[in-house]
Amino acid sequence: MDPATHLIFTLMFLGAGFIPIIAVKHFKKEKIKLNRWHKVLATIKAIRSEKGSDSGRRFYYPKYQYSYGGRDYQGTSSMGVGGNKYKINTPVEVRVNPLNPEESDILHYTKIGATTVLALDLVIIVFTGMSVLAFAVGLGSIIWGLLK
């Protein structure tokens, strides 16, 4: 195989290794929100709608108002949902960061177990290892091909 082909395959494997890394980081962040942030009832005040850039589907981001520690705050869901299941002036459960009450979010799923996080950690270790190995083999073969 020529060095250019090795480089292409190396970059493909390296890129594939980053996908689970990003997914695991997202799930760990959501787990922190689920376990450490406080539950608070909020009221939906508005719903922002955006058209997805890839799919063309519409995504809905509820804007809500909540009280925490005797003060009123506003927030917008960080994750849009397909299909508008929210209605204005209806209650919704949000999670509030107790260290920074201005930071809040609607959790669209409420159970991320330890098993799921451990499985995702295993995926990240395996894919990272595969990526490093593929990169090293690909780089080694490129250097070997250039030295011949």
Image (cartoon, rainbow, N blue to C red):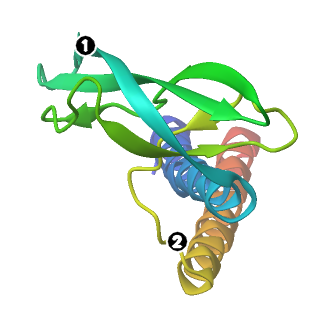
Q: Residue 129: image x %, image y %?
A: 69, 69
Report helix, strand or loop for mark 1: strand
Q: Quadrant of residue 56?
A: top left
* x 63%, y 82%: residue: 114
Q: Residue furthest bottom?
A: 115
Relative to 143, does residue 80 appear above or below in the rendering?
Answer: above
Relative to 142, does residue 116 appear above or below in the rendering?
Answer: below
Report helix, strand or loop for mark 2: loop
Q: Residue furthest front?
A: 70
Q: Is residue 84 left or right of residue 33?
A: left
Amino acid type, residue under disc 1 in the picture: Glu
* x 25%, y 13%: residue: 50
Amino acid type, residue under disc 2 in the picture: Ile
Q: Residue 78: image x %, image y %?
A: 49, 30
Q: CA distance from mark 2 to mark 1?
A: 27 Å
Residue 112 numbered mark, or none: 2
In terms of sequence position, does the residue under pointer 2 or pointer 1 come before the other? 1
Q: Residue 31: image x %, image y %?
A: 63, 62
Residue 50 numbered mark, or none: 1
Q: Looking at the image, how many numbered discs can be counted on the residues?
A: 2
Q: Is residue 140 left or right of residue 116?
A: right
- Crowding at label 1, few (<14), some or many (≥20) Cα neighbours within 10 Å? some
Residue 38 numbered mark, or none: none
* x 69%, y 53%: residue: 38
Relative to 94, does residue 71 appear above or below in the rendering?
Answer: above
Q: Is residue 49 left or right of residue 126?
A: left
Q: Residue furthest right?
A: 99
| Residue 102 visible in image | no
- In depth, the one of 115 and 85 nearer the eye is 85
- In depth, the one of 17 and 122 nearer the eye is 122
